[in-house]
Image (spheres, rainbow, N blue to C red):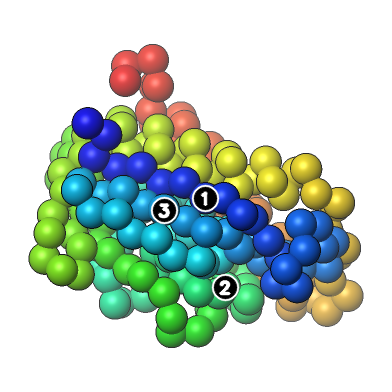
């Protein structure tokens, strides 16, 4: 049985449309299966995908930063060299912890349940989800570049971090061994 899966459907931009060249924050209906727990949430899937990519190399403790399934992620704060972004939104969402233990990813839910997943399986699922979200972006009208420099840099940093993390994780992982 697959101990971790995450899927999104019914993608939309904040105005409810299927394509909005001015909106940079993609939403969707997410179903995450973690062990025998199923979590459903309408959330900001673009932020979720980046947060999942971060968990390929970093631990995440629920309640300490962002939620894994955040309601929104509308404020992108770039670092100075545009390689990382902090995403800010509201306090609503669903969270869990992700800890690394050698070749195992340990997910801890807020209800106390734990699920242990081989890192290869976890990476495959995170890659699949992130690629699906990016494909939706790529199939929409290209985004209008924000006129505000801070907003523009936030969006640039978002995709820079996304592609860096996706590339680094791919380089450190040979999917043929899964």
Q: Secondary structure at mark 1?
A: strand
Q: Nearer the viewer, mark 1 or mark 2?
A: 1
Q: CA distance from mark 2 to mark 3?
A: 18 Å
Query: Of label 3 and label 1, which has the lower sequence position?
Result: 1
**Local crowd size for mark 3, using a 10 Å CA cut-off: few (<14), some (14–19), many (≥20):** some
Q: Is residue 142 left or right of residue 4?
A: right
Q: Tell me where residue 116 appears, x and y as whole percent.
A: 16, 44
Q: Nearer the viewer, mark 2 or mark 3?
A: 3
Q: Which mark is residue 73?
A: 2
Q: Are marks 3 and 1 in contact (CB under 8 Å)?
A: yes
Q: Tell me where residue 93 appears, x and y as whole percent.
A: 41, 74
Question: Residue 91 or 156: which is nearer the viewer?
Answer: 91
The quadrant in which residue 135 appears is top right
Q: Is residue 3 left or right of residue 174?
A: left
Query: Of label 2 and label 3, which has the lower sequence position?
Result: 3
Residue 58 visible? The answer is no
Q: Tell me where residue 148 appears, x and y as whole percent.
A: 83, 79
Instruction: Please report the residue visible at 61 percent of the width from the left and 54 percent of the height from the top.
Output: 10
Q: CA distance from mark 1 to mark 2?
A: 16 Å
């Amino acid at each position: 049985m697959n101990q971790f899966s995450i899927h999104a459907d019914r993608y939309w931009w904040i105005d409810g449309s299927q394509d909005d060249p001015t909106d940079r924050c993609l939403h969707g209906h997410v179903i995450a299966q973690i062990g025998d727990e199923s979590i459903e949430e309408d959330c900001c899937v673009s932020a979720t995908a980046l947060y999942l990519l971060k968990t390929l190399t970093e631990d995440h403790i629920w309640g300490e930063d962002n939620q894994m399934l955040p309601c929104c992620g509308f404020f992108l704060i770039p670092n100075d060299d545009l390689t990382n972004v902090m995403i800010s939104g509201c306090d609503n969402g669903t969270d869990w912890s992700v800890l690394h233990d050698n070749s195992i990813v340990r997910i801890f839910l807020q209800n106390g349940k734990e699920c242990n997943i081989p890192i290869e399986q976890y990476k495959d699922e995170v890659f699949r989800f992130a690629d699906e979200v990016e494909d939706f972006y790529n199939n929409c009208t290209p985004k209008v570049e924000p006129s505000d420099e801070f907003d523009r840099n936030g969006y640039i940093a978002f995709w820079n971090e996304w592609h860096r993390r996706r590339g680094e994780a791919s380089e450190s992982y040979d999917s043929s061994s899964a």
